[in-house]
């Protein structure tokens, strides 16, 4: 499971669809609707939020909007689009790690997109995240 801190606009089609599915799974975990993935490291930052369910729904809202902007038809019924606006932080070290991780994936999976974004010096985060100074997040599995 990979719940990116990066803005979903950087993902290729396969990555965006995978993010949607994996985040819906994360939503089910946070709602107690599944037995698997309960302790997955990618969920820690959402679990630490004052409003974990709102946080994951707010995250999904932006994936949905990105998909719609590309002409994809994800189901808005899968999440609460009227959830509270939740802001979380992410370190600049985590952003750098994810940027490099994504570029490695795209180099083989989508060379056209890779060439388009490889020269970007700093990727912007998913809109729910604010960047802070720091190393790779403790919850990241390297």
Image (spheres, helix red, strand yellow):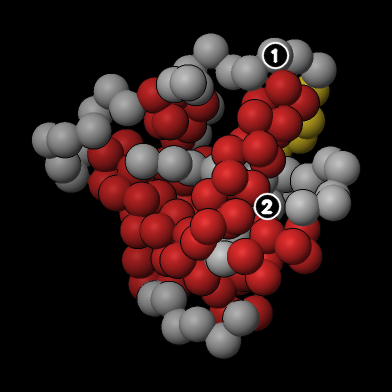
x and y percentages locating residue 129 in the rendered image: 69, 38
Q: Quadrant of residue 36?
A: top left
Give the alpha-carbon distance from disc 2 to disc 1, as whole Å.
Answer: 19 Å
Above or below, 12 against 107 in this view is below
Q: Position of residue 109 (x, y in %)?
A: 50, 61
Q: Is residue 74 left or right of residue 128?
A: left
**Vertical relation: 103 (above or below) 80:** above
In this picture, residue 42 sits left or right of residue 119: left
Q: Is residue 6 left or right of residue 16?
A: right
Mark earlier in primary sequence (2, 1):
2
Which structural element holds mark 2? loop
54 is higher (above) or lower (below) than 81: above
Q: Which residue in the structure is indicated by mark 2?
A: 7
User: Relative to the observer, which residue lies in front, 21 or 60?
Assistant: 21
Which image quadrant for residue 101? Answer: top right
Residue contact between numbered discs 2 and 1, judged by CB atoms under 8 Å: no
Q: Which mark is residue 38?
A: none
Q: Would you call the spot at circle 2 few (<14 residues within 10 Å), some (14-19), or many (20 or more)?
A: some
Given residues 49 and 120, the one toward you in this image is 120
Tell me the element at label 1. Answer: loop
Q: Is residue 97 visible?
A: yes
Q: Residue at x 45, y 66 (%)?
A: 14
- Nearest the viewer among 49 and 142 is 142
Task: Judge the density around disc 1: few (<14), some (14-19), many (≥20) Cα neighbours within 10 Å.
Answer: some
Position of the N terminus by quadrant: top left
Residue 58 visible from this viewpoint: no
- The residue drawn where x is 77% and y is 65% is 116
Q: Position of residue 5 (x, y in %)?
A: 62, 40
Instruction: Identify the disc placed on residue 135.
Output: 1
């Amino acid at each position: 499971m990979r719940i990116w801190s990066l803005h979903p606009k950087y993902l290729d089609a396969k990555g965006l669809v995978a993010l949607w599915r994996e985040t819906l799974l994360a939503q089910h975990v946070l709602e107690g609707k599944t037995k698997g993935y309960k302790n997955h490291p990618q969920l820690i930052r959402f679990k630490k939020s004052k409003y974990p369910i709102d946080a994951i729904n707010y995250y999904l809202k932006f994936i949905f909007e990105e998909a719609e902007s590309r002409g994809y038809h994800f189901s808005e019924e899968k999440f609460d689009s009227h959830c509270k606006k939740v802001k979380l932080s992410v370190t600049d070290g985590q952003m750098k790690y994810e940027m490099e991780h994504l570029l490695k994936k795209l180099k083989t999976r989508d060379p056209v997109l890779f060439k388009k974004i490889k020269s970007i010096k700093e990727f912007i985060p998913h809109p729910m995240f604010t960047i802070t100074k720091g190393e790779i997040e403790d919850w990241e599995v390297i």
